[in-house]
Image (cartoon, rainbow, N blue to C red):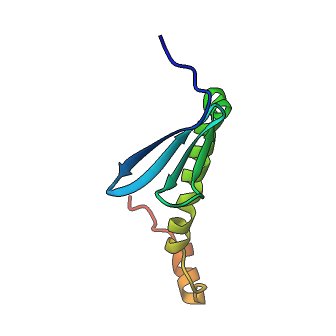
Amino acid sequence: MTTKLDGPLKREISVEGKKYTLTITPKCLHLAPKGRRKGYELAWQSLITGDAALVTALNESLRMIPALEATRRTKPLTPAETRQRGRTKKAKG
């Protein structure tokens, strides 16, 4: 038999050597660095409907943007570089 969750339940956990406080309430999960109030919150409804997976995928795609921007060229191509890129090798035959 399970116990009904009426109020908040707090537990300390360690993730990669850092201490966090996990608070489980009837409405959500809340994970914050130990001694802090701000952290990550996940509503039970979001977890059930799949919105949490969508948010995770969105955050992962947004995290990739700085890596993509770092690979972009910072200065424009010179006319010679532009012509060089426009040329194609002719097939030998």
The image quarter containing residue 52 is: top right
Q: Quadrant of residue 43?
A: top right
Residue 32 shown left or right of residue 58 in the figure: left
Location of residue 65 with respect to 21 vertically, above or below: below
Residue at left offset 61%, top offset 41%: 42
Name which residue lies at 53% across and 75% down: 85
Please tell me whether residue 18 is drawn above or below residue 6 in the rendered image. below
- Find residue 21 and report its horizontal and vertical position in percent: 47, 49
Residue 44 in the image: state x and y as whole percent: 63, 32
Q: Nearer the viewer, residue 55 or 3?
A: 3
Percent x, y of residue 29: 57, 39
Front residue of 47 and 77: 47
Residue 3 drawn at (x, y percent): 52, 19
User: Which of the image's four quarters has the C terminus?
Assistant: bottom left
Can you name the residue that lies furthest to the left here?
Answer: 17
Which residue appears at 66% of the width and 34% of the height? Answer: 27
- Give the residue at x 39% y 55%: 19
Work out whether 81 lies above or below 38.
Answer: below
